[in-house]
Image: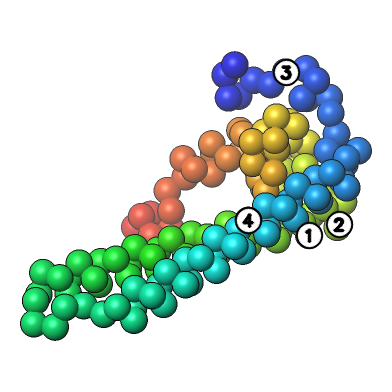
Amino acid sequence: MDPGQHSPAALLADPADHLPQWRDRLERLWVQQASQITGLSLAFRDAAAAGGAAGNLRLAEAHVARLQQIVARMASAHRGLAEIEAALRRVDTGRYGLCEQCGLRMPTDWLDAAPQARYCPQCRAYIAARPSPANCGA
């Protein structure tokens, strides 16, 4: 099925009718994400403690690259955790399942794929296609 098309059942379903189930799913995702962050933090600690090979530039560069990779993954995991927490706040305020851009109800199959989604597929595509402020030449 085309990503812009959704089954009739998915379009008619109202996520608000199942907020406890969505909250439960989001809370489980939160635990998984927090666990991933903990694992990455421990990996960073271990890698930092191992240090680079003194006097060997190639090994030192590889060590720094490994630390940078872990930091990037941790930053991504923290952003994911923030998205899950924002979705939990939307559950609390009764706005879960509504697109933050257009205000329309998101298809259930879209939320099934990404329960923390803020935007419907159409708005997500529109936002992704916009140039970022860093690239707008302002």
| Sequence-wise first label, 4 or 2 | 4
- Dot placed on the residue nearer the N-terminal end, 1 or 3: 3
Q: Residue at x 49, y 43 (%)?
A: 128
From the image, tell me which residue sits under label 2: 93
Q: Which residue is mark 3?
A: 7
Secondary structure under the numbered disc 4 in the rendered image:
helix
Tell me how far mark 3 sits from mark 4, CA to CA. Answer: 29 Å
Rounded to the nearest angstrom, the CA distance separating label 4 from label 2 is: 23 Å
Q: Position of residue 49 (x, y in %)?
A: 34, 81
Mark 2 Cα shell of 10 Å, populated few (<14), some (14-19), many (≥20): few
As drawn, is 76 to the left or to the right of 110? left
Q: Residue at x 69, y 44 (%)?
A: 115
Q: Earlier in the sequence, mark 2 or mark 3?
A: 3
Are the two marked residues, 3 and 4, in contact with CB atoms closer than 8 angstroms?
Answer: no
Dot 4 corresponds to which residue? 32
**Tag 1, which secondary structure?**
helix
Q: Mark 2: which secondary structure? A: helix
Query: Could you tell me the amino acid type at mark 4?
Result: Gln
Q: Quadrant of the N terminus?
A: top right
User: Could you say which is closer to the camera, residue 135 or residue 79?
Assistant: 79
